[in-house]
């Protein structure tokens, strides 16, 4: 009998984080009741709240809680406004990705029925982004930072690309493609970054050779950015390195309808963290104006991840129920948030999703 109980660590974050996190938990509770799940939530302070109380934006106790949980829900954080690392300003997102080895960032972009794409035809693609290295200075070194200033007038950044990371992100992309339309596009800049992106392509080609059922092609990053605007509907699974994936996934989500609907899951072999694809929007904080759909749909992805690991279909059913409810609310002009052209705020949209869950 599959285990239908899960303990989730909840990290509300900064800015609009606490508001959209509350909305997400309301939806999770309702879906859990409908599909027979037992979800318990362990809320922990991170960000500015933790800095004021504990002297750090990411206390060790929070990491230990996340490490021991069945999954985590991470609200947006204002890490660009944190003090230096030595003064306690750790990026919770980067810390979790590095210390839990969350090597794959899975970011779907799908057009919602009733909400037309910004350009081109309906979109249904997934960006599979390597999540632990590349140019991201807060996570690409064992010790120290990947950026440095040897003089006041010179700044250097180190890009790390490893065979291990490239092989496993390629494997994740091709495995995902086997459950979809069986097409993988590798995005690179090997015409300039011949060694680092050359290694990435060497690895994706090696994995592609083991999946003859999957159509495989390659696109240069600047061309890919333009091709998404021309017609994103032709793409299925896009696999790429950290920074390219970060940029392309935001572009694809906005083209498909709105970044406010963009789900995102950071996953590894043993752990997963649901995280909204957008930022903390401090200018909207406390005004009941934020669209909570991105974090709600990210939490649905977390339920999918737990269900697949356990072979527990009730988690998958709850995730599908949440996605249908969000699509119904976002697809109706009367129940959209302002960023989608509607009039509702966080609370109103959440109530619309809760009503849709019951039908």
Image (cartoon, helix red, strand yellow):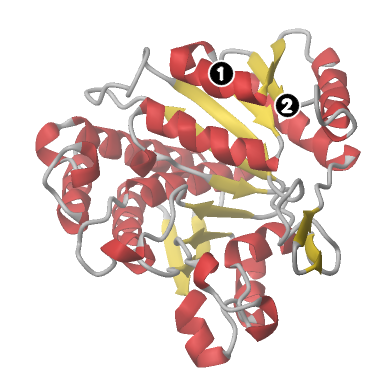
As drawn, 29 above or below 344: below
Image point 37% across, 49% down: which residue? 296
The Cα–Cα distance between marks 1 and 2, rounded to whole angstroms, is 17 Å
Image quadrant where one finds the C terminus: top left
Of residues 167 and 219, the one drawn nearer to the viewer in this rendering: 219
Q: Which label was assigned to residue 188?
A: 2
Tag 1: Cα neighbours inside 10 Å, few (<14), some, or many (≥20)?
many
For marks 1 and 2, give the one nearer the viewer. Answer: 2
Q: Quadrant of residue 337?
A: top left
Inspect this view and state whether residue 342 appears: yes
Q: Is residue 292 left or right of residue 209?
A: left
Q: Which label was assigned to residue 353?
A: none
Q: Position of residue 35 (x, y in %)?
A: 36, 46
As drawn, 226 above or below 172: above
Image point 82% across, 41% down: which residue? 165
Q: Is residue 96 left or right of residue 33?
A: right
Inspect this view and state whether residue 176 appears: no
Q: Is residue 37 left or right of residue 90?
A: left
Q: In this figure, which residue is indicated by the disc labeled 1?
A: 236
Q: Position of residue 343 (x, y in %)?
A: 11, 46
Image point 76% across, 29% down: which residue? 170
Disc 1 or 2, which lies upstream in sequence? 2
């Amino acid at each position: 009998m599959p285990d239908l109980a899960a303990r989730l660590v909840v990290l509300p974050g900064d800015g609009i984080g606490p508001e959209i996190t509350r909305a997400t938990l309301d939806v999770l509770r309702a879906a859990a009741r409908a599909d027979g799940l037992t979800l318990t939530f362990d809320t922990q302070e991170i960000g500015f709240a933790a800095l004021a109380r504990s002297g750090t934006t990411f206390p060790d106790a929070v990491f230990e809680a996340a490490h021991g949980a069945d999954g985590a829900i991470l609200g947006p954080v204002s890490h660009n406004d944190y003090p230096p690392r030595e003064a306690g300003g750790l990026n919770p997102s980067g810390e979790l990705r590095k210390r839990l080895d969350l090597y794959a960032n899975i970011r779907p972009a799908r057009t919602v029925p009733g909400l037309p794409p910004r350009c081109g035809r309906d979109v249904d693609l997934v960006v599979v982004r390597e999540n632990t290295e590349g140019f991201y200075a807060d996570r690409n070194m064992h010790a120290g930072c990947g950026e440095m200033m040897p003089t006041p007038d010179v700044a250097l950044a180190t890009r790390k690309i490893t065979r291990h990371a490239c092989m496993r992100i390629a494997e994740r992309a091709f495995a995902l493609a086997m459950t979809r339309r069986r097409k993988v596009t590798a995005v690179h800049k090997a015409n300039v970054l011949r060694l680092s992106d050359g290694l990435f392509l060497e690895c994706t080609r090696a994995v592609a050779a083991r999946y003859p059922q999957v159509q495989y092609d390659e696109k240069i990053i600047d061309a890919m950015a333009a091709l998404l605007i021309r017609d994103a509907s032709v793409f299925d699974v896009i696999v790429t390195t950290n920074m390219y994936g970060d940029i392309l996934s935001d572009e694809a989500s906005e083209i498909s309808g709105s970044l406010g609907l963009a789900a995102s899951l950071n996953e590894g072999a043993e752990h997963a963290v649901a995280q909204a694809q957008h930022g903390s929007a401090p200018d909207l904080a406390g005004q009941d104006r934020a669209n909570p759909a991105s974090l709600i749909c990210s939490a649905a992805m977390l339920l999918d991840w737990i269900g697949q690991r356990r072979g527990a279909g009730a988690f998958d059913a709850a995730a599908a129920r949440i996605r249908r409810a969000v699509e119904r609310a976002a697809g109706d002009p009367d129940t959209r948030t302002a960023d989608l052209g509607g009039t509702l705020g966080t609370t109103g949209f959440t109530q619309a999703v809760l009503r849709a869950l019951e039908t």
